[in-house]
Image: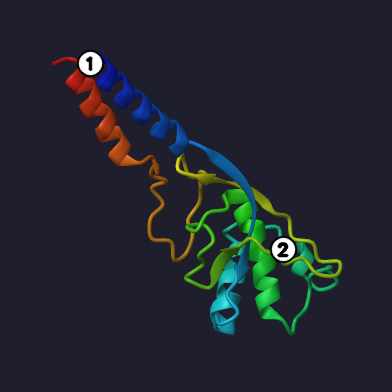
């Protein structure tokens, strides 16, 4: 009887752990917030296209994404390009709170934004590198559920009693 209960507990815990590691792919883009101040967006563009290493050729004069009257659109291109190079996460898509992740493709006309296939789930977070202005935590800590780990530890401990 105890063996049956223990086996069921182990099976349930294992299923929970495996379920927590399920990963789904989702297309994401990093875009500028439409309520961000133009000066803050311009500073973030300057950082992304300079020290951040984003390829900002398409938002230069004559480029397919150049629109001097639409700072939000140009910032979105720079932010998205930066994130496709450094990881599409909430931490990298911050830019001092002027940007956010979206699952809606911001591409328009001849201006195409590459997407980043991002793994969503509880198993891990994509890695990031570089210094991102406005990011709070760059630890990349695992999102593995701690409650299941403790449950597994309790089951293993109980098995030895």
Question: Which of these two is toward me, 156 or 37?
Answer: 156
Q: Is residue 132 visible?
A: yes
Question: Which of these two is toward me, 10 or 65?
Answer: 10
Badge 1 crowding class, 10 Å Cα cut-off, few under 14, some 14 to 19, many 20 or more, is: few
Please, what secondary structure does the residue beneath circle 2 have? loop
**x then y, percent, for residue 51:** 57, 59
Please, what secondary structure does the residue beneath circle 1 have? loop
Picture quadrant of residue 46: bottom right
Instruction: Work out which quarter of the rendered image holds the C terminus and state it.
Output: top left
**x then y, percent, for residue 85:** 63, 50
Q: How many marks are shown on the rendered structure?
A: 2
- Is disc 1 in contact with disc 2, using a CB cutoff of under 8 Å? no
Q: Disc number at residue 150?
A: none
Residue, x 38% and y 40% (percent of image)? 144
Residue, x 25% and y 34% (percent of image)? 150
**x then y, percent, for residue 101:** 57, 62
Among numbered discs 1 and 2, the one appearing first in the sequence: 1
Q: Disc number at residue 1?
A: 1
Residue, x 68% and y 64% (percent of image)? 104
**x then y, percent, for residue 38:** 59, 83
Picture quadrant of residue 55: bottom right
Could you tell me how far apart the alpha carbons at marks 1 and 2 are, in whole angstroms? 56 Å
Q: Is 60 placed above or below 18 here?
A: below
In the figure, is residue 5 to the left or right of 90?
left
For disc 2, the marked residue is: 105
Q: Is residue 49 visible?
A: no
Residue, x 60% and y 77% (percent of image)? 42
Instruction: Work out which quarter of the rendered image holds the N terminus and state it.
Output: top left
Question: Which of these two is toward me, 120 or 20?
Answer: 20
Q: Residue furthest left?
A: 161
Badge 2 crowding class, 10 Å Cα cut-off, few under 14, some 14 to 19, many 20 or more, is: some
Q: Is 131 placed above or below 139 here?
A: below
């Amino acid at each position: 009887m105890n063996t049956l209960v223990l086996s069921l507990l182990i099976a349930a815990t294992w299923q929970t752990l495996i379920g927590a590691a399920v990963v789904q792919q989702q297309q994401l883009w990093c875009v500028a917030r439409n309520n961000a101040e133009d000066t803050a967006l311009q500073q973030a563009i300057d950082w992304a296209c300079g020290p951040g290493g984003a390829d900002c050729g398409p938002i230069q004069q004559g480029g397919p994404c150049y629109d001097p009257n639409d700072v939000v659109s140009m910032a979105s291109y720079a932010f998205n390009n930066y994130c496709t190079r450094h990881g599409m996460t909430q931490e990298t898509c911050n830019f001092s709170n002027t940007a956010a992740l979206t699952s809606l493709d911001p591409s328009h006309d001849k201006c195409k934004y590459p997407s980043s296939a991002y793994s969503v789930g509880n198993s891990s977070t994509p890695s990031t590198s570089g210094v991102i202005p406005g990011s709070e935590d760059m630890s990349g800590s695992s999102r593995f559920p701690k409650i299941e780990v403790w449950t597994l530890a309790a089951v293993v401990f109980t098995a030895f009693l």
